[in-house]
């Protein structure tokens, strides 16, 4: 289990301009839908965008605080 604020902090450490919304998918605070909007995704394909987020969440995923994530990664222009 991980607090949403901490989850957002992990992502913002890797992508400081990120606007992150978190949805707890199951009510157990370990399965999440993440919507991340950042210009750090410019010129990156879907897999590279997801890799950035997974790298940012490496620690809580390895220790089991996060069991599963679904990711929507967009640039500022794509989010409009």
Image (spheres, rainbow, N blue to C red):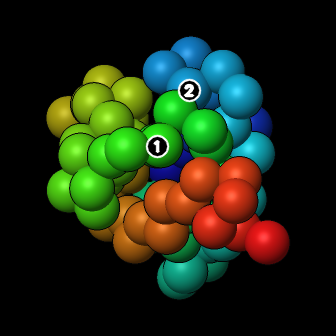
Q: Nearer the viewer, residue 14 or 24?
A: 14
Could you tell me which residue is drawn at 55 percent across and 60 percent down?
74
Image x and y of residue 5, in percent: 74, 37
Crowd tier of the residue under label 2, counting other residues whose Cα lies within 10 Å: few below 14, some 14–19, many 20 or above:
some
When the figure is inspected, residue 7 is found, relative to residue 26, above or below; the finding is above
Q: Who's the residue at 53% across and 82% down the image?
A: 26
Picture residue at 68% right of the left edge, 37% below the top:
18
Q: Secondary structure at mark 2?
A: loop
Q: Is residue 61 above or below residue 66?
A: above
Q: Residue at x 62, y 42 (%)?
A: 38
Q: Percent x, y for residue 72?
A: 49, 69
52 to the left or right of 37: left
- Mark 1 lies on a secondary structure that is helix
Judge left or right: residue 66 versus residue 35.
Answer: left
Q: Residues within 10 Å of mark 1 (few under 14, many from 20)?
A: many
Q: Is residue 77 visible?
A: yes
Q: Is residue 20 visible?
A: no
Q: Looking at the rendered structure, which numbered label has been put on residue 15?
A: 2
| Residue 2 image position (x, y, % from top left) | 55, 43
Q: Earlier in the sequence, mark 2 or mark 1?
A: 2
Dot 2 and dot 1 residues touching (CB under 8 Å): yes
Disc number placed over residue 41 in the picture, else none: 1
In the picture, residue 58 is in which quadrant? Answer: top left
| Camera-side residue of 27 and 79 | 79
| Distance CA(mark 2)–CA(mark 1) | 9 Å
Q: Where's the C terminus, which quadrant?
A: bottom right
What percent of the width, then of the height, locates residue 78? 63, 67
């Amino acid at each position: 289990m991980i607090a949403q604020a901490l989850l957002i902090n992990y992502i913002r450490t890797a992508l400081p301009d990120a606007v992150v919304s978190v949805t707890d998918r199951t009510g157990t605070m370990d399965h999440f839908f993440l919507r991340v909007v950042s210009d750090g995704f410019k010129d990156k394909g879907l897999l590279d965008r997801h890799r950035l987020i997974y790298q940012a969440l490496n620690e809580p995923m390895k220790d089991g605080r996060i069991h599963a994530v679904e990711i929507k990664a967009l640039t500022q222009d794509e989010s409009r």
